[in-house]
Amino acid sequence: MAEPDTTNRRPVVIGVAVVAIAAIIAGLVFVAVSGDDVEDAGERTSDTPSTFDDTGTRGTTDTEPDDGTDLPTGEDPAIGLEPVADLPGVSAVVDLDGDGPVLASTLDGRIHELDLDSGDSEVVLDLSGQISFGGEQGLLGMVADPGEQRLYVNYSDSSGDTDVRSWPLVDGRPEGGPSDGVVHLELGQPFSNHNGGHLTFGPEGLLWIGTGDGGGAGDPQEVAQDPSSLLGKMLRVAPNPDGGVQAPDSNPAWDGRPEIWGIGLRNPWRYSFDRETDQLWVADVGQGAVEEVTVVAPDAELANFGWDDVEGDQDFEGSAAPAFLAPQITYGHDADGGCSITGGYVYRGDDIESLHGWYLFGDFCGGWIRAVPADDADRDPVELVSGAGGAITFAQLDDGELLFATESGLSRVVGP
């Protein structure tokens, strides 16, 4: 049985106490499951869905994306953090149309209606009774569809497996109770870590679901490079409001599951599309040496992020190959003071002129926020904030402004 990986954990919240997963490094370990449980986990995965022809409909954006060459890039970026709410463990924020409150999910399984001005919040959907919470499990992701008809969540269910479900949105709130969610995807998890969990809708209107490699150290099940498994992948699907998903014909031909858009991921902890260029920025948590961010062009085909042949820009169980996407951002665990990356966004708001066109990212262990210009992502990052706390997630509001969540609360990203 493979030794469980004990590095690069995410934060959890237990009651009112905040527990950093970095404590696991000091001696706490996850218990690996048996071979029989691994087989059972596979059986709990949703069946292969049908496909549909999205040529000329869902496969293209309404407008051609900018290539980035004519977009302004700020100089000498500087930011501050302005506290919004003492809401521990925020895992996602959804900013619906209008001037009303946002929806904020927390790792403990609750969805809150949150007033960003006053900091007041109210639980509008409580899923805490049907999730696994702790370690790298919990309510990990949330997003509304482009038409704001349904709210989609990604959580670890009571068995520790991944569930993607949705609820109708009525007057800015999810309608119904915990048992009323429509099931879109169930994915068996052989270990309790590396669940991925982020959700976003792409510029073409499809749902992108990042999955981890199922956990344990070094991808022991060898799933990340296996196109017959949904683990260690970037999925791209069209959810059916009545349940399940369909896979678009425009997904690459991996000779495996049709939901798969990209392969070779370890634990993608936040990815986002640049709203000006449609480039996809994917942050993937490293094994024990290298954290990475890879920038993917809108027209990329057969995107392979390389795990577990490579870890970032270093060889792991194999070596770099021409088919692998090379990461633009990498940093080590010792000299660079980090161990678990949290991806963010390319800033396209109006309030911070010096930040325009810069991609922000953080690290749970390092407690900092750094940035690179989107048009020169290979350059050395600039550190914008230190001592911010363990980074859980960034969020982008409808106007392009950003929020930043740590294990202790939620803040606005503001000018200095």
Image: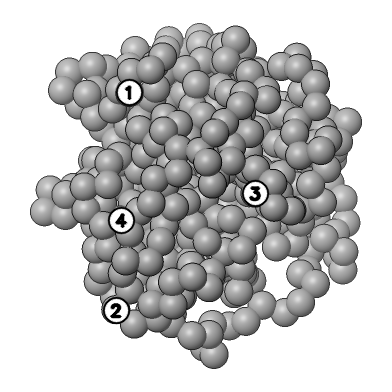
- Quarter holding residue 277: bottom right
Nearer the observer: mark 3 or 4; the answer is 3
Residue 229, given in percent of the width and then of the height, sits at 59, 35
First in sequence: mark 3 vs mark 1: 1
Q: Work out whether residue 266 or residue 405 is closer to the camera in this orientation and state it.
A: 405
Per the image, label 4 sits on a secondary structure element best described as: strand
**Quadrant of the image containing the C terminus:** bottom left
Q: How far apart, in angstroms, are the residues tagged by discs 1 and 2?
A: 34 Å
First in sequence: mark 3 vs mark 2: 2
Q: Which residue is mark 1?
A: 18
Q: Which residue is mark 4?
A: 369
First in sequence: mark 1 vs mark 2: 1
Q: Residue furthest bottom?
A: 70
Disc 2 marks which amino acid? Asp
Q: How would you rate the neighbour count of disc 1 (Cα within 10 Å): few for under 14, some for 14-19, many for 20 or more? A: some
* Contact flag, marks 3 and 4 (Cβ < 8 Å): no
Q: Which residue is mark 3?
A: 95
Residue 166, given in percent of the width and then of the height, sits at 75, 31
Q: Which residue is mark 2?
A: 76
Disc 1 marks which amino acid? Val
Q: How far apart, in angstroms, are the residues tagged by discs 1 and 4?
A: 20 Å
First in sequence: mark 4 vs mark 2: 2
